Amino acid sequence: MTDQLRKRLARLDPMPPGVPTESMTTESSQNLLEDIMTTPATEQPASQPEPKPNRWLVGAAAAALVVAVGGAIALTGGPSGDPVAGGPPLVLEAGGEDVTASCIMFSVEELARAPLAFEGTVAAVEGESVTLTVDEWFKGGDAGQVVLNAPQGMEALIAGFPFEVGTQYLITAYDGNVNYCGFSGPSTPEFRAAFEQAFGG
Amino acid sequence: MSSETERRERFEAIATEVYDPLQRYLRRRATAEESGDVLSDVLFTVWRRLDDVPRDAVLPWCYGVARRSLSNHRRAAQRHLRLVQRLESERERAPSENPADVLHDQDPDLAVALAGLPPADREILRLWAWEQLEPREIAQVLGSTANAVSLRLSRARKKLAESLTRQDDSIPGHKGDERAEEQQR
């Protein structure tokens, strides 16, 4: 039955193997690949200037790319230099209070009480700051980026979850403080489903 | 990765592997314009992070980058929701322009059932049936674990089957009955 369902679903695929895609040998494909390979490949540390966009990257694509791979705009450019739509980054404190004091047993109902909830991808980790690019706001905000500040070392933050660049996290916050006691953490399908249920997403 | 020549060779090998499936992945989820932009983003990311691309999961890794890039892309323009709605309504309005609609017409019951699932369930089913990924690979795309994905996938399948059954119950004599019953057996 599983195989049958998979096949039946596959028949809804708008891009099945028979539908052609652009070949890698076309001139525009070759130009794109050549442009990429002539770009300096060294990873830009957060403290260095952002890479200059290539000519094939224009407008929103360039902005999205800078956020996706270019690093911490919020840490280097400051709010005024933020090229991302949605205004200056939101700053939250993470780890400022007694971790155990705020622990409540997890439930979707409790999760739904959080005034602030979003899913974001870590764009940069520098010292005690983590910059997340917001992928989706579930509740309470519209900033394009959120900066999490921890007073003493990142290991204090979101108990047991190191922040890795490029990984997605689901975060809730109360009064400007990240709620890390089971109500924030790496994004998994289950955790995301709880957010969707809680915030009607 | 030592020499420039080696980097280029590795990049070209990856690009050859992902160029076609990545375009399919994007066109299943985005407009042609967005697909082109995100394809560039992903290949650029591959070039810059060549050493991070896992050799045994090149394509799922690229799907994961594409997923985040597409998400950023849409948010950057602050039109994610409007775009999704527009895409949906475009699909309804202009069926002949989108190959998906021809296929939707072939199996409207399933298309409706799929559309009624939560976005996360829909996406996991698409990655499974359209990209033909296994749970381990889906986990790579979504940044999850194979176990969690397996569980989630089996729940999503169950929800889909239940939704198909409900459709049949609510519409007596509906033409999808035979197919859905077949599914149940």
Image (tube, coloured by chain):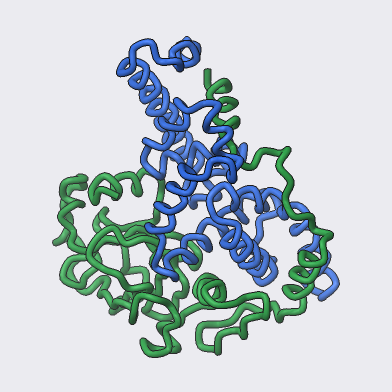
Total numbered labels placed on residues in the image: 0
Q: Looking at the picture, how far across and down is residue A196, in whole percent? A: 30, 48
Residue at image location 16% in from the left, 70% down from the top:
A175
Q: Looking at the rendering, in which quadrant would you find the N terminus of chain B?
A: bottom right
Q: Looking at the picture, how far across and down is residue A87, in whole percent? A: 34, 80
Residue at image location 18% in from the left, 71% down from the top:
A97
Q: Closest to the observer: B167 or B102? A: B102
Q: Is residue B44 left or right of residue A83?
A: right
Residue B26, above or below B102: below
Residue A112, above or below B77: above
Q: In the rendering, what colour is chain B?
A: blue
Residue at image location 41% in from the left, 81% down from the top:
A127
Q: Is residue B40 left or right of residue A86?
A: right
- Give the chain coloured green: A
Q: Closest to the observer: B127 or A24? A: A24
Residue at image location 72% in from the left, 55% down from the top:
B19
Residue B168, above or below A136: above
Name the quadrant containing residue A177: bottom left
Q: Looking at the picture, how far across and down is residue A51, in whole percent? A: 60, 84
Q: Is residue A18 visible?
A: yes
Q: Is residue A161 visible?
A: no
Q: Closest to the observer: B94 or A143? A: B94
Q: Looking at the picture, how far across and down is residue B53, in whole percent? A: 66, 60
Name the quadrant containing residue A25: bottom right
